[in-house]
Each structure stands twice: as structure tokens, then as C-alpha cells.
């Protein structure tokens, strides 16, 4: 899976969680939740969706490392997805 | 015979449009079965029946808009013998049978017209000899019923689908009513959430991702449990205080397109944190899709609003009538906090209570908040 594939997957999952938003407009350093208006319930649904789609499990203590698109992609890379 | 009426799904609802019957005459229904889809300002709501039995008559046609309280169907209670059918009735698939009342004196023609128009003859006053129901009596009763059920000119039969504007107007109606009628009082307390969050982190460490709990389940559980000790807050005001047996927390869910909706979490005090999370996993997506059931919109006994971790520090709610209280939670913030003479930084939650001063006084509210605080500082007891 390439970095572009990961990005595409992230956008698809975010679109599913927040259908009225356009995740493709997210900048690399934008805070995902703030920019798309995602609350804690939807944020958890996104974590669950990432787990189901990519097989990665993000522990609660790592939530802070996945706040922006850039951070999230980097985090997923560390899980050996690339 | 049980009358099934257009339910009230909140203080803001005056009427609903029947979109689809899910049953037909002769069907057996159980308590909780969904028997109709009704369109309200809050979207298409699945309407449940609260009595088991057999559907005898459907009195409202699809796409008709009728006021709250209108009799929509007649249901013969389980175990009750079916009413004898009129001798000259048409086949059921063409004309659903109207109940015949053999004890009534009814002319054959009147009986036939009543059957064709799904009219319950027991509701008709006879003007014939000895009180017999005549053709004229039936025709008059049918005409009066049709006028009653006919949408008023100002109310289009085909109500627009739920929209942001409709939701906004529903919220506006309920909140305006609250502001007009309910004398609110407000109380606030700060709660050290260190133990609760530590308990939650430990609980989530042992769970797969899909089973993780959010802090809000502890807030719901603690509120529900505290209410057991303060039944005057779990009540409605309807010509006086009326306590409610069940503790059904109306949970405020914000809609992504604006506005909010408040479905009930039934018997929240009896649910474990895991069960409450399962309920939220079911309820929130359906609420945001405006696909709720009637009981979920009508059975709340108190409201809880939580702004979440991105929200303001505190929220002072407006009571949803006819309820008598709303509990509010702000975001959890790290704040300096003193304990046993030592200053430390703690995750602090500001909890508020807005109470109806007709129903309770500040002392009751204050004691409730103290109990809530105690429970959240002993999460293992939840």
C-alpha cells in the first residue's frame, strides 16, 4: 500500500463518518477533528474503521499522535502498512 | 377495543403525517411492534404500538396529516373475541371489515355504509325508532369524521421532509415553551475526573477497539444512578409533579447539519457502561439519519447534554417540557485543583443542573449534584 493509497483510504473513511464534509480539502497539518467538525463519538468510529480497514489498532494513549493528516499517515507507516 | 392515537413525540409536536401503514386489518401486533411511519419535523419516525392485539381498523389514510391525539387505528386486545362480521360485508381484501355491534339496532343499509367507510358503529348516535342507527346517522358520522381528519388548509398534507430548518423550528418551539412556562434555577459543581478517566483508560486497555468506552457513558450512568435517590428530578410537570418509574435519559445528539435531537436511553440506571455504549452506537447514527422510533422520542424523563472534549467549559441547559430538569456537562479541562492542602493539576469537569422551580428547590438540586460528583469519583461503583 502506497502513501497515496493510505491517504485515499483515510479520506474514504472520513467521508463515511462525516458525509457532509470534503476530507480532500484537509491540509497536511490541519487538525482533522477540528477542521471536519468531528465529535468524540465520530472520532471513535473513525478509529474503529481504520482498525477494520487497515488492521491497525491505535491505543488511546496514541490518539495525540494522529491529530493531523501528516501525523496520521506517519503513524500508520510505523505500523508497517507501507 | 383499544384506540391507537397519533403520539406526541415532544413538546414541539402538534401533528404528524402518516406516510405508511406497516400493518393491515387482521394483523396481529405485539407491544413494541412498529406499525406505521409518521413524518414529523424531526424526520420519518417509526411508530410503535403499546398494546398487543389484532388490528381491527385503520382510520387514517396514508399521506394524511392529523393532530396529536387523533385515533389512527383500532386494535382488538389480545384474548378478546373478534367482533362478528357484518353479514353483507365485502371481501376483506376489498373492504376491511368494520366491527359490527349486534347489540346495536342498525339498519342493514346503515351497517353496510359503516363497513364501507370503516366507521365504528358504537361511536354513532342513533336517531331512528328506539335509538336505531339509520343511513342518515351513519352518513353524518362519516362526514363529521372526514372533516375532523382532513388537513387544515394551512397544513399541507405532504409535509416537507425533515430539514435543518424543520429541526430548528422544532427546537425553537420546545425551547420557547420552556422559557415561557418553566421557572428555571441553575446549579453548578466541579468534579475531579482523575479516577474516572483512569478507570476508563484501564477498562479500554482490555477492550478491542470496537468495544471501547467513551467518557460520556460514565456521565450517563452516574446521572441515572444519582436520580434513583432524587425521584423528583426524574419526573414531568403536568398539573403537578408526576414522578416517573423508569429512568430514561434523553441524550442530546447534535446533528451535523445543525440542530439537535434528543432520543431516550431507556432504563439507563440498569445498564452497565458497556450496555450504554452499545446503546449509543445504535442510537447516534440513527438519530443523525433521523431514523428514530416513536418511543425513543417520547419516553425521556430527564435530559442530559454533554458538550464533549471540544466543547465549552460548562453548559446551562433549557429544560425540555414537560420534564423538570436537565443535566449539563462541559468539556473536561486540566485545571489547578486543591486537595488535602496540596495544589495539583487535575482533569476537571463542570456539571450543571437546571431545575424546574415548580417541581424542586435548589436544595434538592444541590444534593443531586453532590451525589453525582461522589459517583463519578468512585467509578468502580458505576
Image (cartoon, coloured by chain):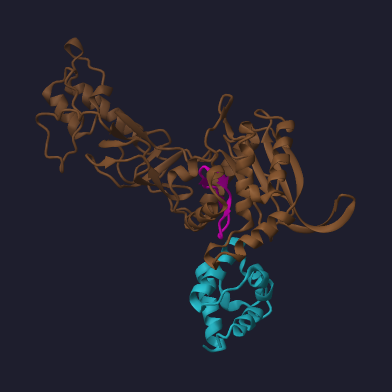
Chain colours: A cyan, B brown
The answer to whether residue A23 of the structure is visible from this angle is: yes
Q: In the visual, does B121 lie left or right of B249?
A: left
Viewer-side residue, B129 vs B185: B185
Q: Residue furthest right?
A: B341
Q: Is residue B253 magenta?
A: yes
Query: Left or right of B125: which side holds B337?
Result: right
Check the image and report above or below for A16 versus B361.
below
Q: Position of residue B51 (x, y in %)?
A: 35, 35
Q: Quadrant of residue B346?
A: bottom right
**Quadrant (top left/top right/bottom left/bottom right) for the N terminus of chain B:** top left
Q: Position of residue B252 (x, y in %)?
A: 58, 50
Image coordinates of residue B79 in percent, x first then y, are: 25, 31
The answer to whether residue A19 shows anywhere in this view is no
Residue B92 to residue A25: above or below: above
Work out whether residue B300 or residue B322 is closer to the camera in this orientation and state it. Answer: B300
Residue found at the far left of this picture: B88
Residue at 70 percent of width and 40 percent of height: B371
Does B381 sit left or right of B37 as displayed?
right
Start and end of the magenta stretch? B249-267
| Along the line of sight, the residue nearer the viewer: B304 or B291 | B304
User: Which residue is rendered at x = 53% and y = 62% of the image?
Assistant: B211
Q: Total number of numbered labels?
A: 0
Q: Quadrant of residue B309?
A: bottom right
**Residue placed at 61% from the left, 41% from the top?**
B225
Q: Residue B164: give x, y in percent of width and height.
A: 53, 55
- Is B371 magenta? The answer is no
Give the image quarter of residue B66.
top left
Amino acid at each position: 500500500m502506497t502513501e497515496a493509497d493510505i491517504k485515499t483510504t483515510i479520506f474514504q473513511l472520513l467521508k463515511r463518518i462525516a458525509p457532509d464534509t470534503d476530507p480532500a480539502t484537509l491540509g497536511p497539518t490541519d487538525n482533522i477533528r477540528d477542521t471536519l467538525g468531528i465529535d468524540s463519538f465520530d472520532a471513535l468510529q473513525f478509529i474503529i474503521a481504520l482498525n477494520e480497514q487497515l488492521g491497525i489498532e491505535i491505543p488511546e494513549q496514541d490518539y495525540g499522535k494522529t491529530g493531523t493528516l501528516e501525523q496520521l499517515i506517519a503513524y500508520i507507516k510505523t505500523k508497517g502498512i507501507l | 377495543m383499544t384506540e391507537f392515537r397519533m403520539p406526541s413525540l415532544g413538546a414541539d409536536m402538534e401533528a404528524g403525517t402518516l406516510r405508511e401503514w406497516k400493518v393491515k386489518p387482521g394483523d396481529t401486533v405485539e407491544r413494541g411492534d412498529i406499525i406505521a411511519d409518521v413524518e414529523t419535523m424531526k424526520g420519518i419516525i417509526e411508530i410503535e404500538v403499546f398494546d398487543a392485539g389484532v388490528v381491527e381498523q385503520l382510520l387514517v389514510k396514508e399521506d394524511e396529516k392529523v393532530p396529536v391525539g387523533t385515533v389512527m387505528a383500532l386494535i382488538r386486545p389480545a384474548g378478546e373475541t373478534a367482533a362478528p362480521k357484518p353479514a353483507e360485508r365485502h371481501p376483506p381484501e376489498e373492504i376491511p371489515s368494520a366491527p359490527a355491534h349486534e347489540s346495536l339496532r342498525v339498519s342493514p343499509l346503515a351497517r353496510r355504509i359503516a363497513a364501507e367507510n370503516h366507521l365504528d358503529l358504537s361511536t354513532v348516535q342513533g336517531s331512528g325508532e328506539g335509538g336505531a342507527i339509520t343511513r342518515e346517522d351513519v352518513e353524518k358520522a362519516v362526514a363529521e369524521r372526514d372533516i375532523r381528519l382532513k388537513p387544515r388548509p394551512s397544513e399541507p398534507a405532504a409535509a416537507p421532509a425533515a430539514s435543518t430548518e424543520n429541526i430548528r423550528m422544532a427546537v425553537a418551539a420546545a425551547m420557547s415553551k420552556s422559557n415561557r412556562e418553566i421557572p428555571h434555577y441553575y446549579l453548578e459543581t466541579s468534579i475531579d475526573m482523575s479516577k474516572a478517566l483512569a478507570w476508563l483508560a484501564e477498562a479500554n486497555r482490555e477492550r478491542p477497539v470496537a468495544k471501547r468506552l467513551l467518557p460520556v457513558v460514565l456521565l450517563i450512568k452516574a446521572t441515572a444512578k444519582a436520580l434513583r435517590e432524587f425521584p423528583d428530578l426524574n419526573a414531568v410537570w403536568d398539573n403537578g409533579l408526576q414522578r416517573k418509574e423508569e429512568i430514561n435519559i434523553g441524550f442530546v445528539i447534535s446533528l451535523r447539519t445543525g440542530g439537535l435531537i434528543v432520543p431516550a436511553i431507556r432504563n439507563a440506571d440498569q445498564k452497565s457502561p458497556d450496555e450504554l455504549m452499545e446503546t449509543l452506537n445504535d442510537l447516534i447514527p440513527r438519530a443523525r439519519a433521523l431514523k428514530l422510533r416513536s418511543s425513543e422520542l417520547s419516553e425521556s424523563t430527564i435530559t442530559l447534554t454533554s458538550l464533549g472534549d471540544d466543547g465549552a467549559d460548562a453548559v446551562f441547559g433549557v429544560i425540555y417540557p414537560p420534564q423538570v430538569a436537565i443535566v449539563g456537562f462541559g468539556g473536561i479541562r486540566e485545571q489547578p485543583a486543591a486537595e488535602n492542602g496540596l495544589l495539583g493539576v487535575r482533569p476537571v469537569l463542570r456539571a450543571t443542573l437546571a431545575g424546574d422551580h415548580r417541581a424542586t428547590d435548589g436544595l434538592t438540586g444541590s444534593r443531586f449534584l453532590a451525589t453525582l460528583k461522589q459517583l463519578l469519583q468512585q467509578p468502580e461503583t458505576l
